[in-house]
Amino acid sequence: MTSSSKVHPESAKLVNNYIESLPQWSKDICNKLREIILSTSQSISEDWKWNHPNYYCNGMLCGIWAFKDHVTLVFFQGALIDDKYSILSSNPENLHNRHIKFSDISQINPQIIRDYLLQSVDNNTKGLKINQTKIKTIEIPYYIKEALENAGLLESFNNLSYSHKKEYILWIKEAKKEDTKNRRIEKMIIALRDKFGMSHL
C-alpha cells in the first residue's frame, strides 16, 4: 500500500469498533461505503484519523463521518473531482473538500462513488492539490444591503468580523416567509444599533 507508513497500526480494529457502535441504519451505510472504497483499488489503505475512518492513496483520499441523522462521505481535495452526476456538496468554509450525505443505504450508488474515488486516486497520484487559501469575503444580498444603507449601518456591518457577518446573513436568508425575513432584518438593525451580538436576538 502506498500510504502504509501513515496508517494507524490499529486502524482496522478502531474502524470496526466505530461502525459497530452506530445505530443499524448508519452501520449499514458505513459498512457499504467501506466495502466500496476498499474494493475500488488495492492501493487504497484504511486509516483512523480525527476519530473517524479515513482512507489514503498517495495522500488523503476520503473519510466516513457518521452523524445523528446522516452519514457523510467526504472527499478531501474533492474540488478537483469532475462532478458529472451533480451529487457533491461543498462548504463555503472549505475550498478543498466535497461531500455526499446519506440517510439510507438505498441512496448509495457504488458506480458513482467508485468513479469519484478513482478520479481522486488519479489526482493524488499526479500530485494535484487545491492551494487556494480561504477568502474571507461574503456577498451581502441586495435587500440586506439596502436596509443597512437606509439605517446608516452599512459601514458598521462591514466592520464586523467575517463570522458575524456570515451569521447574520445566513440567519436572515434561511427564513422561509417574507415577513419572517423582514423581522429578522429589523432585529439585526436593532442589534447593530445597540452593539449587541446575535446571542441577544
Image (cartoon, rainbow, N blue to C red):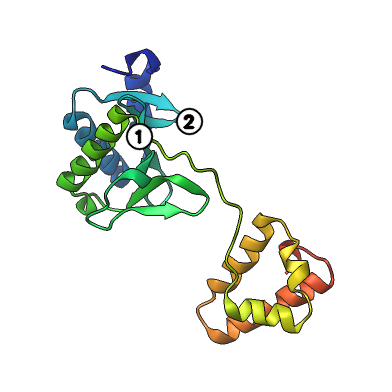
Q: Quarter of the image holding residue 13?
A: top left
Neighbor class of circle 2 (other Cα within 10 Å; few <14, some 14-19, many 20+) is: few
User: Can you give x and y, in whole percent of width and height, for residue 174 in the image?
Assistant: 53, 71
Q: Helix or strand or loop: what does disc 2 sit on? A: loop
Outermost residue on the right side: it is 194
**First in residue order: circle 1 vs circle 2:** 2
Neighbor class of circle 1 (other Cα within 10 Å; few <14, some 14-19, many 20+) is: few
Q: Is residue 80 above or below residue 147?
A: above
Left or right for 103, reference 91: left
**Pick the front one: 157 or 185:** 157
Q: Which amino acid does label 2 sit on?
A: Trp
Q: Which amino acid does label 1 sit on?
A: Leu
Q: Helix or strand or loop: what does disc 1 sit on? A: loop
**Pick the front one: 117 or 124:** 124
User: Can you give x and y, in whole percent of width and height, for residue 98 in the image?
Assistant: 38, 47
List the residue tagged with mark 2: 50
List the residue tagged with mark 1: 128
**Pick the front one: 199 or 122:** 122
User: Can you give x and y, in whole percent of width and height, for residue 120 in the image?
Assistant: 28, 37
Q: Is residue 9 visible to the viewer in this orientation of the structure?
A: no
Q: Which of marks 1 and 2 is in front?
A: 1
**Can you tell which mark lies on residue 11?**
none
User: Can you give x and y, in whole percent of width and height, for residue 88 in the image?
Assistant: 32, 53
Q: Quarter of the image holding residue 64?
A: top left
Q: Residue at x 36, y 48 (%)?
A: 99
